[in-house]
Image (cartoon, grey):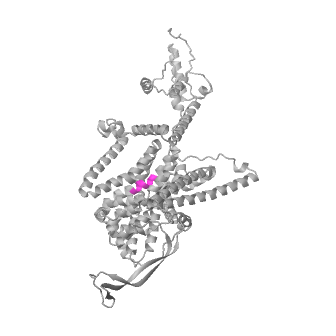
Amino acid sequence: MAPWPEVEKPETNNYIGDSSKQNQNMAGKEGENHKGNVAAHGNKGEIQPAFSTIALIDEARPEEEDPWALPELADTGVKWSELDRKGKIIRVMYGIGKFIMLLGLLYMFVCSLDVLSSAFQLVGGKAAGDIFKDDSVLSNPVAGLVIGVLVTVMVQSSSTSSSIIVSMVSSTLLTVKAAIPIIMGANIGTSVTNTIVALMQAGDRNEFRRAFAGATIHDFFNWLAVFALLPIEVITGYLYHLTNAIVDSFHLESGEDAPQLLKVITDPFTKLIIELDKSVINAIATNDESAKNKSLLKTWCETNTSVTLQNVTIPPSENCTSPDICWTAENTTWTLKNITEIIPITKCKHLFVDADLPDLAIGLILLALSLLVLCSCLVAIVKLLNSVLKGQVASIIKKTINTDFPFPFTWLAGYLAMLAGAGMTFVVQSSSVFTSAITPLVGIGVISIERSYPLTLGANIGTTTTAILAALASPGSTLKYALQIALCHFFFNISGIILFYPIPITRLPIRMSKTLGNTTAQYRWFAIFYLLVCFFLLPLFVFGLSLAGWPVLLGVCLPLFALFMAVVVINIMQKRKPHSLPEKLQNWDFMPTWLHSLEPWDNVIMASLSFCGKHCCGFCKCCKVNTEQEDAKDKQLKTMEVYENTMAMADEERGGRRTPAAAGMEKAGTNNTAL
């Protein structure tokens, strides 16, 4: 190939391709530098270099958006000022209709949570009562902790597990000291509900990222608080001594029933579906053998208890307390005893009152129906909120919830959010209901992760104040124990807040939930894996070890815990100070890929789902169609990008990447490219 001719004043185009208006608009320092270089080379009569367009494409490419930034819910409809009178009336009527529909969906959502709790109690309530019977295991604080987690997950209600604990303490089957770790476990188990709710937003990647992080921030706070405070409680017993001093300083009397705020609205509907006799679980936990064969379904809603003095026979070996009330007739000894009889008056009206089905079958039916209603309501609520929270309304709500106060009082906004969360939880009488309600709001971007954290902490406090009021309404025999256990729950949450909220650097649950959110957004199956491990497999594993005794429990758990902490510390140092580590530990590449990356596992799971989609069911085919639609959307966006180098566009369409040599040339700063 002949060399290029030498010219005195070359007018070399600095960019390959069509010299359009885009080239003219790229004026700046880099353009001037290029021109200076061209002039210098031209004066020397040298061949002019062709400048690469790859660097220009990289520079022109917009920066990646922060996935945690709250999205702008733009108003796509006609502006209010552009509507005529009829249009304004129609829009107002639509708004009122959407608001009424939202209230109805929220009502059904809360009722489905209540029915879900009843279903879990029917499925696992008796098993939960049996777990509490082994007092030798309950004396182990670690075993008590995981039992609290398992039982609360099984009955889907921390108030139910707390009432079981109060019954056991009042019947001297359990001491208050041994009950404190179980209360801590119940605090963890109650956070499983909003984690399940977050799974319903897995359709949109960014919504799922935010929703799952907003739900699991509750989990991480509870786990961290337990890891920090359980050893302190075992060593010092500070919660026991503090609450015991408070209870002893009060002159306690049995009060009236605790206020039922939300139950007044939801009970008329849920009692038409199912009604349970929760005293059966308490009786099983307190070793009442007669309760094992009883059904949890309540058959008679109104009964009357009568005590009558009747003649009964007694064995001859039994001594009579007084000859006046004992007599013998025809070799039979008789006596007078008070016999308690329960006389049914009014039968319950729920759907399964006359059903000839075992508790397990009814529980499974209700579990499927309640999950179906829960998912449907949640999807409809998210869609409705997306249509309502747009434009100016969304900006006002976001500013109201997420805005901080001016500088000297910046810290105050979080504590006000905490009070708001406690107040709302007190109104709905359930932390699960409140945190499950704000989870979709976090997902669609109305509430930030940073603001959902104090709201969740407030929900933890609100549910304990409800428990304190319920304890004050207990009968005199159980009043002291119920109040002391409720106060232990309250001060445990207060201690956790003191550890993990006031100083920003200690707000570890926010960072941990964001890390998990990023992982689950990339590998959505990991959310189900997390749910199974944290709330089922890990507690069951620890519970099984605790049955073998302290030596086995410590011998297995301590090395595993030390290994886990070492991995966490090395991961942190790899990100912040990698040069402080040995060269081999600066990354995990020396280990097999499946041990330090989820990519191989993801490939296996996706291959299994693909096989299932072809041979098993149509659901996976729907997932495959959704994936293909996302890929087609990404491809369409790529084709809409403007490239000045058509070769680069062709390479991307073929799925090709730049060769290592080309990457090395770009790294070295060279601007030459082959034609």
Q: Is residue 44 above or below residue 224?
A: above
Which is more toward the observer, 436 or 224? 436
**In x, y percent, where is residue 412?**
49, 59
Q: Is residue 101 above or below residue 628?
A: below
Residue 156 visible in the picture = no
Residue 617 visible in the displayed image:
yes
Q: Where residue 625 appears, x then y in whole percent?
A: 54, 38
Q: Is residue 441 left or right of residue 120?
A: right
Camera-side residue: 240 or 312?
312
Query: Relative to the observer, which residue lies in front, 179 or 581?
Result: 179
The answer to which image quadrant residue 219 occupies is bottom left
Count numbered badges in the picture: 0
80 left or right of 399? right
Kindly give the residue lying farthest to the left in the view shown.
551
Give the dominant element type of the magenta stretch: helix, strand or loop.
helix
Q: Point out residue 63 in the picture as x, y percentages from the top left corner.
A: 52, 37
Residue beneath the point at 37% across and 41% down:
575
Query: Which residue is located at x 30 percent, y 90 percent?
Result: 323
Residue 179 picture quarter: bottom left
> In the drawing, does residue 108 fall left or right of residue 280?
right
Please tell me which residue is depicted at 66% across the width and 56% down the height of the picture.
97
Q: Is residue 216 magenta?
A: yes
Question: Magenta region: which residues?
Answer: 215-222
